[in-house]
Image: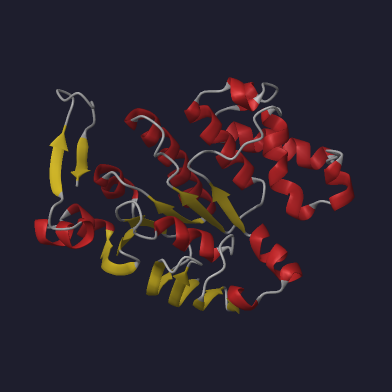
Amino acid sequence: MLSIKNLVKIYDDGTEALKDVSFDVDDGEFLIIIGLSGSGKSTLLRCINRLIEPTEGQIIWNGEDVTEADSNHLREVRRQIGMIFQHFNLVKRSSVLKNVLAGRLGYTNPMLSLINRFSQADIEMAYEALRRAGIEDQAHKRADELSGGQQQRVGIARALMQNPKMILADEPVASLDPVLAHTILGYLEKINKEDNITVLCSLHYLDLVQRYATRVIGLRNGKVVYRGSGEDIRKMTDEEFKQIYGEEAERVRVGPDSSEDVDGEKING
């Protein structure tokens, strides 16, 4: 279980990105975090594995306080937490296979990893991760030769190489079209269900949230303003919507006849 307790993040310029955020995540959940840009979604996810250092509060992961972990222990904690990024964070000039193998760096002798020496077992594991992400036929291409959707699947395969107990996905489909977005989230859902890997994912489109979330947390200006189940989000009222996105926001339903060709809802604000 993951417990976020009274988490605060204040940046050096005085920006309060997170304000007393608290919630729990049960093992095996697909928790989606929603809110406008600047609401604190990315900061929250990056605080969980301390890519960003929180200012106050606790992050309790399987009974251990991650905020108190020293550098050696933090390395062990991060082995269990995969990370998927909006802009993929791949080494563009390296092969797909090498990018996926980077997910084993937390388990590999640092000196060997510097010269890209991985065991045969790790290499076989990388091919299996690529197979699960539906991209094994691209293993020897350079990462920058792939489409955006393919690159994000490389990111998923890289995360799987950690044998993670939890995956943090920071706006993983924001740069993809709606069809590819469903494909990527479908892979994450499959991993979540088959491997019982907890997924925390930040998203914008409500139709995606309604389709994939088992539970939802809504952030606005760094505060939790909404908590609900997957069923709750499917029945979200206009009042609840505006609580998250502001009074000026409008729910705009779009479909195949619209210029965006999306089946669901979007936010105008």
Residue under the point 62% across and 33% down: 130
Q: Position of residue 203 (x, y in %)?
A: 35, 48
Where on the picture, by quarter, is residue 117? top right
User: Is residue 204 shown above or below 134?
Assistant: below
Q: Position of residue 105 (x, y in %)?
A: 75, 49
Q: Count of labels shown?
A: 0
- Asked if residue 68 lies left or right of residue 253, the reply is right
What colour scheme does the image use? secondary structure
Where on the picture, by quarter, is residue 127? top right
User: Is residue 148 shown above or below 266?
Assistant: above
- Asked if residue 17 lies left or right of residue 229, the reply is right
Residue under the point 83% across and 45% down: 113
Residue under the point 35% across and 66% down: 222
User: Is residue 139 shown above or below 217?
Assistant: above
As drawn, which residue projects farthest toward the front? 13
Where on the picture, by quarter, is residue 207? top left
As drawn, which residue projects farthest toward the left? 238
- Asked if residue 105 lies left or right of residue 135, the reply is right
Closer to us: 63 or 218: 218
Q: Position of residue 56 (x, y in %)?
A: 50, 78
User: Is residue 175 shown above or below 221?
Assistant: above
Residue under the point 41% across and 39% down: 173
